[in-house]
Amino acid sequence: MTDKFTALTPALYDYLVRQAPPLDGVLHDLREETEALGPIALMQIAVEQGAFLTLLARAIGARNAVEVGTFTGYSAISIARGLAADGRLLCCDVSDQWAAVARRYFGRAGLQDRIELRVAPALDTLRALPATPSIDLAFVDADKPSYRAYYEELLPRLRPNGLLLFDNVLWSGAVVDASDRSENTEAIRALNDHVARDARVESVMLPIADGLTIVRKR
């Protein structure tokens, strides 16, 4: 089978990013403040992911969205900006420190009335939601061992044709390293295998940043 992918070099990736919509002052400043935190800034999504989330939310007319793992708020702002005028985003995180940064930028973006950020274990928050299938879009970028649990809580609450997205599904290539039996890697492999075989959904895994899986509920 002929390879049909283009390996990204730093120069090619820079070109890709430069073709994305330019960052406004809010996202620019948020990226800079987050990057100043040091290595933990790797938890922030990539620029092209943010643009993709906005476009995807807008394309499906999403009104009711959920995010698991908000960090400093870049992905939440990206999703919220793509929602319909009456849309709402529920964010789940466990860090008061990162939530404080996120809320500050939600205010700067004029989204404080559209985004609710709950600081609590995400599974508790999700299990407290109505069981009705009313979520249009959900994005998960949180602790990897809980990915499968998040999937099982969110999928029944997703409307038919709703979308569920998981970040880091390639895990820097570790998913194909047979010698890597770490908890995070095994958890991502387990989710990937389960989604690919789940008759309730159809899915596609895309090489965006560290890998992004999009799941559509049938």
Image (spheres, rainbow, N blue to C red):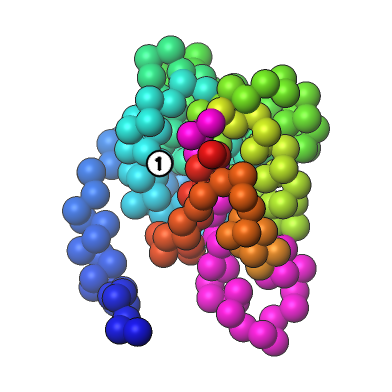
Q: Position of residue 132 (x, y in %)?
A: 67, 21
| Residue position for label 1 | 53
61 left or right of 74 in image = left
Q: Position of residue 24 (x, y in %)?
A: 28, 36
> Going by the picture, which residue comes out furthest to the front?
199
Q: Does residue 31 appear to the left or right of 41 in the view shown?
A: left
Q: Is residue 38 magenta?
A: no
Stretch in magenta: 160-187
Question: Is 6 placed left or right of 106 in the picture?
Answer: left
SS for callout 1: helix
> 166 or 116, which lies in front?
166
- The structure residue drawn at horizontal position 46% and vertical position 46%, both measured from the top left corner, is 33
Seen from the viewer's position, the closer of residues 151 and 121 is: 151
Query: Residue placed farthest to the bottom in the image?
Result: 179
Where is residue 136 shown, x and y percent of the image? 51, 29
Q: Quadrant of the N terminus?
A: bottom left
Tell me if residue 75 can be seen. Answer: yes
